[in-house]
Image: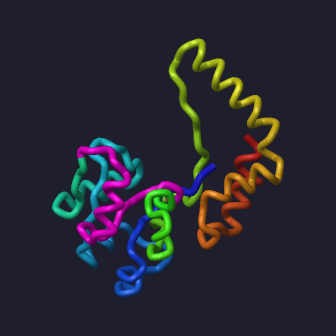
Amino acid sequence: MQLNVHIVIKQKLADKLNLADEIILDDLFRKNNLNMVKIAGRPYMEIDSVLARYPSQVSDRSSGSITGMFEMLENDRIDFLISDINVANYALKENAEHYKYIAIKGLKNLELGYIGCSKTQWGESAIQDINNVLSKIKSQPEYLDILSSQYNKDVLNNDYYNFYHEQFLKR
């Protein structure tokens, strides 16, 4: 269970542009003329079509270095990134409080996460072991604490906890 990708932008710029906690991605490009970078070839699923409309404002980075992309953001070489919140928190470390995470209108806020392994006997066995352990621990309060600990408290809300109880636990 995880929060969907968010826009990661410096708090000062978000305040200057008066950006809400949830925005239409097109508006960042069209109305605010902002730019971003993404990892070349990485699918952004539902928002790929939006990103494709703004080739002059969306640059591809051939390196898969997440930290390099956040350095670009930190050094004002780009205006924002689209990232998982826990990845952003890790990359930004002690500077995370200087950034705002904005939900993208039209994306589900929460999704189920999946683990993949190679399609071998070992991989199938590993997935079965993970599923067995997960079925035993996922309803324990400590497990929810671990899941939610990767996020800043300001992004957690009733939707997160409702999704946990109504979607995640029923799988």
**What is the x, y in percent for residue 84?**
48, 56
Q: Residue furthest front?
A: 94
Report the front residue among 5 and 99: 99
Image quadrant in which you'd find residue 114: top right
Q: Which residues are magenta?
A: 62-87
Residue at the image position 34 percent from the left and 44 percent from the top: 42
Give the vertical position of 71 relative to 136 (above or below).
Answer: below
Quarter occupied by residue 13: bottom left
Residue 115 relative to residue 19: left or right: right
Residue 22 inside the magenta-drawn segment: no
Q: Residue at x 39, y 59 (%)?
A: 82
Q: Is residue 148 left or right of residue 92?
A: right
Task: Mark yes or no: residue 73 visible.
Answer: yes
Q: In front: 8, or 28?
A: 8
Q: Residue furthest left?
A: 56
Magenta span has 80? Answer: yes
Residue sitting at x 32%, y 57%: 69
The C terminus: image quadrant: top right
Residue situated in front as seen by the camera: 15 or 76: 76
Render colour scheme: rainbow
The total of numbered circles placed on residues is: 0
Q: Is residue 160 left or right of residue 169?
A: left
- 21 sits to left or right of 71: right
Q: Position of residue 104 (x, y in %)?
A: 45, 65
Residue found 57% across the figure and 57% down from its top: 3
Q: Is residue 43 above or below residue 14?
A: above
Q: Is residue 106 visible?
A: no
Percent coordinates x, y for residue 148 in the rendering: 67, 58
- Residue 76: x and y, percent? 27, 71
